[in-house]
Amino acid sequence: MAPLYFFSTFLLTIVVSFPITNALGSASCEPIKANDKDLIQFPLNLEFLEAEFFLNGALGRGLDAFEPAFAAGGPPPIGAQKANLDPVTRRIIEEFGYQEVGHLRAIITTVGGTPRPLYDLSPQAFGKLFDKAIGYKLDPPFNPYSNTVNYLLASYAIPYVGLVGYVGTIPLLANYTSKSLVASLLGVESGQDAVIRALLYEKANEKVLPYSITVAEFTNAISNVRNELAMCGIKDEGLIVPLYLGAENRTESNILSADTNSLSYARSQPEILRILYGTGSEYKPGGFLPRGGNGKIARSFLDKV
Ligand SMILES: *[C@@H]1O[C@H](CO)[C@@H](O)[C@H](O)[C@H]1NC(C)=O
Ligand SMILES: *[C@@H]1O[C@H](CO)[C@@H](O)[C@H](O)[C@H]1NC(C)=O
């Protein structure tokens, strides 16, 4: 792991010296400064995604079955399905889905909404991310909807990105209303991430059949690929880590992903887009957002292409 860390630091140094787009794509780690409205609308890109993934996964119906006006005319997602979940997990995911509806309502009533972007939540979209994480084509292709463990692994890939985004956003906000809203969104988002990680940790050393890859190995691979895509060092850690990434350098278990003082990592909007697009570039849509995100911040990159 040490060489990776040093390489990332090296990369960061290059990036800080040359903040303009370079051969590696744009690789600024700086957050975009914007007004509170644009800063709070940006996470709608994640909240819509989570709402659709969780509601469809638990119930086979998405946001339009509950609050159709929230989409503001944006298209329904491609490929979202009801997942084959055990009863406890299904209940948890259903609750998470409703929580996302509440989050959307809170954001929309506070700063106004933006149209739901087009999402690709198909098994193929997840399959591609998992292939990239593992480093070869999984056979059979990874399907997030086929069982509880697969669905939890796919879920591992989502609220965490929202969590680190909110941690990154709060210090940029100007006023009390905005800060208190985002603090409260962060609270529940990190709770969701913790539940998903704890459920996966119980199975950390089990193989994800039919692959010969354990649950913990999958989480490490997903975290690593997110760090690579975001290009801003280690801000994402799997469930079993080298001691130097564990709490107080004393644990290899890593139920929560956090820095050396066990504080949450923060990510900027460009880092989040690089991950969600799966392209490593906030200018190049793809992955879960084939046409890119919505709102002023996400569109500002796309309008430059
Ligand atoms: C504070 O921010 C909210 C949005 O979060 C906005 O609706 C409100 O007008 C702002 N208040 C002031 C005093 O700027
Ligand atoms: C843990 O190790 C890192 C180096 O990997 C070091 O910077 C940090 O101070 C250590 N933390 C403690 C509590 O010893």
Image (tube, rainbow, N blue to C red):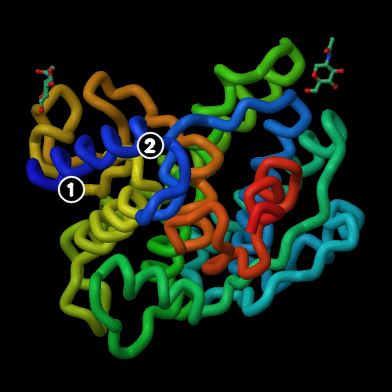
Pointer 1: what residue?
A: 240
Give the residue drawn at x 52%, y 68%. Answer: 287
Residue furthest to the bottom: 140
Q: How many marks?
A: 2
Viewer-side residue, 179 vs 88: 179
Work out how far the residue at label 2 is from the one at label 1, CA to CA, in angstroms: 34 Å
Q: Position of residue 153 (x, y in %)?
A: 38, 62
Q: Secondary structure at mark 2?
A: loop
Q: Is residue 52 visible?
A: yes
Give the residue drawn at x 77%, y 36%. Answer: 107
Viewer-side residue, 101 vs 47: 47
Q: Are marks 2 and 1 in contact (CB under 8 Å)?
A: no
Inspect the image, locate mark 2, and give the three-letter code of the amino acid beneath it.
Answer: Phe
Q: Crowdedness of circle 2 by 10 Å Cα count: few (<14), some, many (20+)?
A: few
Q: Secondary structure at mark 1?
A: loop
Inspect the image, locate mark 1, and give the three-letter code of the amino acid beneath it.
Answer: Ile
**Front tag of 2 and 1:** 2
Q: Note whether 55 is above or below 147 in the view shown.
A: above
Give the residue drawn at x 59%, y 71%. Answer: 121
Q: Is residue 190 visible?
A: no
Mark 2 vs 1, N-terminal side = 2
Q: Position of residue 278 (x, y in %)?
A: 46, 63
Q: Note whether 10 is above or below 262 in the view shown.
A: below
Q: Is mark 1 within 8 Å of ligand 2?
A: no
The C terminus, quarter of image: bottom right
Q: Is mark 2 within 8 Å of ligand 2?
A: no
Pointer 2: what residue?
A: 18
Q: Note whether 55 is above or below 199 in the view shown.
A: below
For ligand 1, the image quadrant comes to top right
Give the residue drawn at x 44%, y 64%. Answer: 154
